[in-house]
Image (cartoon, rainbow, N blue to C red):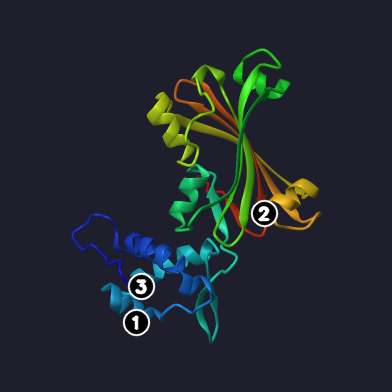
Amino acid sequence: MDDRIDFTSKTPYHLQAERILRHLINTKKYRSGATLPNEVALARELGISRNTLRQAINRLVAEKLLIRKKGVGTTVNTLGKASSNARNWMSFSQEMKALGITIKNYELHIRWEAGAEEICRFFNIKPNTSLLRMSRVRGSEQAPIVYFFSYFNPAIGMTGEEDFTQPLYTLLEQRYDVTVHKSVEEVSAMLADEELAQKLYIRVGDPILKRKRLVIDKKGFPVEYNIGYYRADSFTYRIEAER
């Protein structure tokens, strides 16, 4: 194992162990279904207690990235199930990076088109205003996870010539000084039609998670109107609440 616990760091050991495990389970060996070393051996190799290691493993089990099998051990969920947290939202790139999943871009298309009434109302512009539309199919190295499309406020000044292979919100911040702050989301269930089935490598009628995301900055400036269609067998939408 190349990664090591940094005992001089202020980051808790269980969080460091979680990061190391995320990298480990994304390697070819474990993606193919190999069983992780037992907890005693793994804790000894990392130089931490078994209880500390178990905290990290429990988090990955809760996210369905790892599966515990009685009498077998702990293995990687070979579906590579991704997860999103409604409390601390991120871009898809950031979500996948946090989970240690290598992103593969299956499709990327950029075009200009007249904005529908609902989209233009969100941006507070006239209906049928020409808007930049980006559509992408992205996922893990094993299979697509999401097909989504985004429209951007024309006041940002985007041209369509941007490098959309980099994380979207990083691009907006570094190139246009637009820092996203808040996401208002709606999540619903649906069945895949022919187009979605083709893009996500599933069958017509398979379950899909649809997520509409309206993104604004700290001043309330509307930045992005986004619709994402996620494979239900590869994505979990997690909600945390406090009282």
Q: Residues within 10 Å of mark 2 (few under 14, many from 20)?
A: many
Eyeballing the image, is 184 above or below 29? above
Residue 199 in percent (x, y) is at 70, 50
Q: Residues within 10 Å of mark 3 (few under 14, many from 20)?
A: few
Image point (28%, 55%), residue name: 11
Eyeballing the image, is 10 above or below 68? above
Farthest front residue? 161
Q: Nearer the viewer, mark 2 or mark 1?
A: 2
**Total numbered badges shown on the rendered structure:** 3
Which of the two labelled residues, at mark 3 and mark 1, occupies the earlier sequence position? 1
Q: Amino acid at mark 1?
A: Ala
Q: Which residue is mark 3?
A: 51
Q: Amino acid at mark 3?
A: Asn
Residue 231, numbered label = 2
Which of the two labelled residues, at mark 3 and mark 2, occupies the earlier sequence position? 3
Q: Nearer the viewer, mark 3 or mark 2?
A: 2
Q: Amino acid at mark 2?
A: Arg
Between the C-alphas of marks 2 and 1, the distance is: 36 Å
Q: Which residue is mark 1?
A: 41
Image point (50%, 19%), residue name: 157
Farthest top residue? 126
Image point (70%, 57%), residue name: 201
Which of the two labelled residues, at mark 2 and mark 1, occupies the earlier sequence position? 1
